[in-house]
Image (tube, helix red, strand yellow):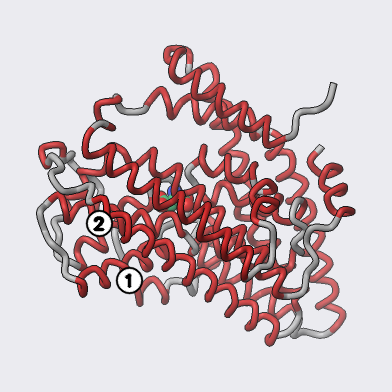
Amino acid sequence: MKKIAFHWQVLIGLIIGVLFGLFLKDYVSYVSWMGIVFLRGLRMVIIPLILTSIISGIANIGNAENLGRLGLKTMVYYISTSLLAIITGLFFVNLIKPGVGADLGLVKQVTELSAVQDSFSETLLKIIPTNIFEALTSGEMLSIIFFAIVFGFFITKVDKKPSDFLTDMFNSLFEVIMKITMLVIKLTPLGVLGIVAKAVSDAPSITEFAGRMGIYMITVILGLFVHTFISLPLVLRFIGKMNPIWHFKNMATPLLTAFSTASSSATLPLTMNAIEYKSGVSNKISSFTLPLGATVNMDGTALYECVAAMFIAQAYGVDLTLGQQVIVVLTALLASIGAAGIPMAGLVMISIILSAVGLPLEGLGLILAVDQILDMFRTTVNVYSDTCGAVIIAKSEGEILNDKKLINNIHENTR
Ligand code: ASP
């Protein structure tokens, strides 16, 4: 019998998970542990994976000029696609006006709003860790990435002997971590089944999704849909000179995982795996762009932030001027950059936008009930945009991607 392709296995896991959560609610604990095991496995590899892959990737890039060029391209891609996403969201929210007439009686109590927030300049300063070990233990991604880039860069600046030794060492460490990652990845279909069964059985009742909230959800999902199936494919086609369908197919497994886990960070090991082994992007590029992308490049979240803030404004009957809408766009961009790649991180960040345009923070209570579902969709788009960035940048650096030998390699690796 022919083996079922891996992304189909993941999809089947997802579908069984949904059915399980719907019809066997009382037995969910029999499968939910698989989701916990899978997520713990992913979390176990994330920090060592980021650290070793960035250090070895940067040490292999070699010089400051290449690094600077790569950094600039990456940032330009991240900011422009996020802005594109926000503008798409703004267009639909102004067109559909989901918030007009929304029932403010549905506002729920929001707790832990104080989780927010450093100012933008503070966030920037905090990228420099005062204690790298503390940053590692508390999983401060940007600080870890910063340190790894600096460390990797200075490996190339020391004498040849220590430099070669360290490069070899980090290349080897990376290989080992990648092997462990492969093992965790093998569990994806079962993990996804467990996570989805639990999420579906915990989901709020259908009435929450009716009426205005339904229209709000449709607005967000429509925007995400246009960004994923029109805007990004056009960018892939015309800037990356790639076949968007080929790319989408290659990314099926990380995308389904992003949808199920609602976490870009947790999905990162699968994203790196697919980008390197399916698309054939070098580790040099993927290790630089993807960890950074999982933390700062969130097109889906950016779009969602804008639509949600506008929805709240509409629900409170506040007509935002053009100038205020520009502020919404810019703060949505900042909020998406600042949001961590974990479930529901984007929800609290909306308070930045609300306070920037003087809307009541309680407005968040209005969108709380449906956030979990929208999180799944926006995280998928976040990850998708990261992968598009990685292949576009790889292409622009002269890498050849869709090569037959490579595709054969993949099968060896995912078996
Ligand atoms: N869950 C999203 C992510 O991990 C962040 C968000 O809440 O918008 O990408």
Instruction: Note whether 376 is above or below 60 in the view shown.
Output: above
Which mark is on residue 208?
Answer: none
Residue 83's place in the image compared with 371, above or below, is: below
Which of the 4 image quadrants contains residue 396? bottom right
Can residue 134 be seen by looking at this rendering? no
**Residue 40 figure quarter:** top right
* Foreground pick, 72 / 323: 323
Q: Residues within 10 Å of mark 2 (few under 14, many from 20)?
A: many
Q: Which amino acid, mark 1?
A: Leu
Q: Is 91 rendered above or below residue 315?
A: below
What residue would you read off at disc 1? 330
Residue 133 at x, y = what percent?
55, 62
What residue type is disc 2 on? Ala
Looking at the image, which residue is at 18% across and 67% down?
357
Q: How many marks?
A: 2
- Is 236 or 82 nearer to us in this picture? 236
* Mark 2–mark 1 distance (CA, rounded to whole Å): 12 Å
What is the quadrant of residue 370 in the picture? top left
Mark 2 lies on residue = 309
Residue at disc 2, CB closer than 8 Å to ligand 1: no
Left or right placement of residue 337 versus residue 144 in this view:
left
Q: Is residue 309 left or right of residue 403?
A: left
Query: Where's residue 109, x and y in %?
Result: 17, 41
**Which of the marked residues, 2 or 1, is nearer the chain's N terminus?**
2
Q: Visible in this render: residue 1?
A: yes
- Residue 251 rendering spot, x and y as whole percentages: 65, 48
Callouts 2 and 1 close, C-beta under 8 Å? no
From the viewer's perspective, tell me whether residue 78 is left or right of residue 108. Answer: right
